[in-house]
Image (spheres, grey):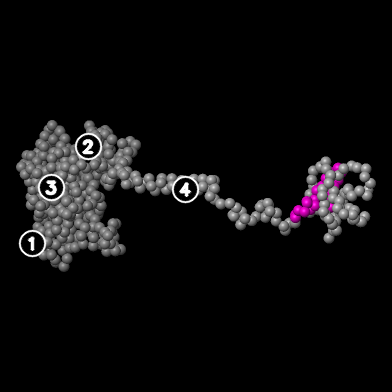
Amino acid sequence: MMRQAKGTYLPLPIQQTDRPPSSPLVETFSPRSKFASTPGMYTAPNSPHHYSYASSRPSSSSDSSISGPASSILSRGDSHYDPQVWDAKILASYPEADDSLHNPNPRQRLSRGHIFTVRGIANLGCILIMVLCIVGLFVGYPVINFAMSPPHTKSFGVNATGQIPQLIGNWGLIDTETPQDAHVFTSFMDGSDWQLVFSDEFNTEGRSFYPGDDPYWEAADLQYWATGNINWYSPDAITTRNGSLEITFSKEESHGLDYKGKNNVSGLWPAVWTLGNLGRVGYGATLEGMWPYSYDTCDVGAVANQSLNNQPPAAHQQGPHKNESISGLPGQRLSRCTCAGEEHPGPKHKDGTFVGRSAPEIDLFEAQVDGKLGAVSQSGQWAPFNDAYLFKNDSTGVVVDDPTITIQNSYSGGPLQQATSFVSETNQICYQLNEECFSTYGVEYKPGYDADGAYISWISDNKQTWTLKAAGVGADDTTEFQRGLSRRSQCTS
């Protein structure tokens, strides 16, 4: 180690004096260059003052000057200051108290102060307000809006907010030209209000109903062989004119049949009816085991011929002919008896059994001529069948509004269908070639069982003609089945 002078040292300004060399002030010069790069060297800017240290006690000539690391570094032209002379510890292994960059102390940093300051409270408060706003926006608002909003209809075409979609070009489910007073319908049965979910005013001239031409309707382009028709249904025969749908029956030879024109001449069978949406008119494979079933029970009513092991006798032997089954149907294809793994589109009941599905038929009207008077048969077609195809036509099952114009149809069914039908006289002037007025026909329909208050009411000339209650075609102890009115979606045909 280099030798260091003893004693206490005071910095004194170096002055140019005429003192002799024996003076206690000693002027020293650094043996190091100002360009030296020795560790611990610090180069300071020039200063007008130069400092030196002198011993406070007499010393020998060998101790008259300070050299080595403890000596001052001085130069007349430019000064160099060595921090070591200030008693500074500049070793690389010794951390400086204020150098947190090179000598970090996390514990010391974390221990400084606390968060309960004005700034800390402001930061926490801001974060809390942001969290509350986000929760309120995405959780609170939807919950409050749902709780305060009135209940909405679950009818098809109406979204969760109760809005009916409005599409460009008047292709919404409700025609924009439908009058506002027609948006609510008053029930013929109980006077309640029903909301309109679909309408078509047919005000656009010359619409085409070929497949794909219209978003709602499609004209048949086929021969309807299932009922033995010998005519061809063509989309050319259907268009729109003068605010109505126009269907033309051409008076020309067609498959050996000349069509008649007047309403009081027999030969035509015009009809408007609905069919469960799992079947398609004119495509027999879609109706096999589907039409006219309306059944959601697993019992003998869902099997072929409506009997199993020759039971029950009423279904096995009391058909239209002696010792013949009451039903000639192949059984319900998509019944509640369907086993797991068998073909069935679903859905399922809560007990895991499949929902019985099918394609029942409800007729708005089938036009006919009774003598010289125009009339309509308004009916429903069902399977399975009641004993002898007889439905319960007392006051618990049927209501006829005006017996003077409405009577029960003599036809009640056969091996392929059971019919509940009444025939009503129509407005005789609302036919083509007469005054050509319009007459309103319809059906008001609440599905379900008798306990649900289910019913079907038929409308002719804007008046209720008759009503079938669920009890009219309900459970039958003789043929051992139970049924309600169809819950299936219906398509107009």
Q: Quadrant of the N terminus?
A: bottom right
Residue position for label 3: 467
Residue 113 vs residue 439: left or right? right
Labels 4 and 2 touching (C-beta < 8 A): no
Q: Residue furthest bottom?
A: 309
Q: Earlier in the sequence, mark 2 or mark 3?
A: 2
Span colored in magenta: 71-90
Q: Which mark is residue 322?
A: 1
Comparing labels 4 and 2, the label whose residue is closer to the camera: 4
Secondary structure, mark 1, is loop
**Relative horizontal placement of residue 218, taking residue 379 as reference (left or right):** right
Q: Amino acid at mark 4?
A: Leu
79 drawn magenta: yes
Q: Earlier in the sequence, mark 3 or mark 1?
A: 1
* Residue pointed to by mark 2: 182
Taking the magenta stretch, the answer to whether it contains residue 89 is yes
User: Disc 3 vs disc 1: which is toward the camera?
Assistant: 3
Distance from Cα at disc 3 to Cα at disc 1 = 33 Å
Instruction: State the residue in front, 271 or 173.
Output: 173
Q: Nearer the viewer, mark 1 or mark 4?
A: 4
Residue at x-position 41% and y-position 45%: 137
Q: Earlier in the sequence, mark 1 or mark 2?
A: 2
The residue singled out by tag 4 in the image is: 128
Marks 1, 2: nearer the viewer: 2
Asked whether disc 1 touches disc 2, contact meaning CB atoms under 8 Å apart, the reply is: no
Q: Is tag 1's residue or tag 4's residue first in the polypeptide sequence? A: 4
- Tell me the SS state at disc 3: strand
Q: What's the residue at 15%, 60% (across, down)?
A: 481
- Judge the density around disc 3: few (<14), some (14-19), many (≥20) Cα neighbours within 10 Å: many
